[in-house]
Image: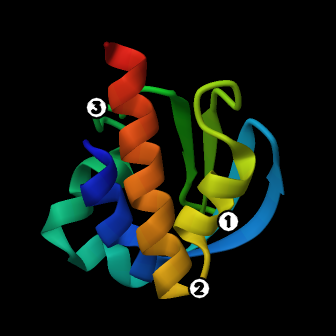
Amino acid sequence: MDLATLFQARQYLAIKAHTPGALRLGVNPAILGDARFKSLASGDADLPPGILGVDVSIFTMSVTLRYDPERLPAARVEAFFGADEALADAALAALQQTLEQGRA
């Protein structure tokens, strides 16, 4: 799963807690009806570079995203999942650029 697809899932996610390297998101159950995100719900998604793991809890309807704060700055990760669309769009572009530079 690439960052753009994860970005599309934002409509179902809300930040619950964040420390650099770990972001806990509340999940709207409606995500289960969206076929684009079936692999996220099962935890079987291929993860973008810099994302270390995704822990899904169906009982608490939450997802904990573990990431490398050296590759993905905490402020950008938070903006990526935040409510402000303009900041989220900018964060997506910045994270994609950061990851592309890391591959070179």
Rendered residue at 76%/69% (across/down)? 16
Q: Position of residue 25 (x, y in %)?
A: 64, 64
Image label count: 3
Task: Categorize mark 1 by other alpha carbons within 10 Å: few (<14), some (14-19), many (20+).
Answer: few
Q: Amino acid at mark 2?
A: Ala
Q: Nearer the viewer, mark 1 or mark 2?
A: 2
Label placed on residue 92 = none
Residue 1 appears in which quarter of the rendering? top left
Rendered residue at 80%/55% (across/down)? 18
Work out whether mark 1 precedes mark 2 in sequence or the reverse, and give the earlier one.
Answer: 1
**Is residue 58 something one can see in this rendering?**
yes
Work out whether mark 3 precedes mark 2 in sequence or the reverse, and give the earlier one.
Answer: 3
**Is residue 61 something one can see in this rendering?**
no
Relative to 98, is 93 above or below?
below
Q: Amino acid at mark 3?
A: Asp
Depth check, front residue: 27 or 5: 5
Q: Tell me the CA gap for discs 3 and 2.
A: 25 Å
Task: Categorize mark 2 by other alpha carbons within 10 Å: few (<14), some (14-19), many (20+).
Answer: some
Q: Which residue is mark 2?
A: 83
**In the picture provided, is 55 more to the left or to the right than 97?**
right
Q: Which residue is mark 3?
A: 46
Q: Amino acid at mark 1?
A: Thr
**In the picture provided, is 39 more to the left or to the right than 75?**
left
**In the picture provided, is 27 more to the left or to the right than 15?**
left
Tell whether label 3 touches label 1 (CB within 8 Å).
Answer: no
Q: Which residue is mark 1?
A: 60
Q: Position of residue 94 (x, y in %)?
A: 46, 51
Rendered residue at 29%/38% (across/down)? 45
**In the picture provided, is 65 more to the left or to the right than 36?**
right
Residue at disc 1, secondary structure: loop
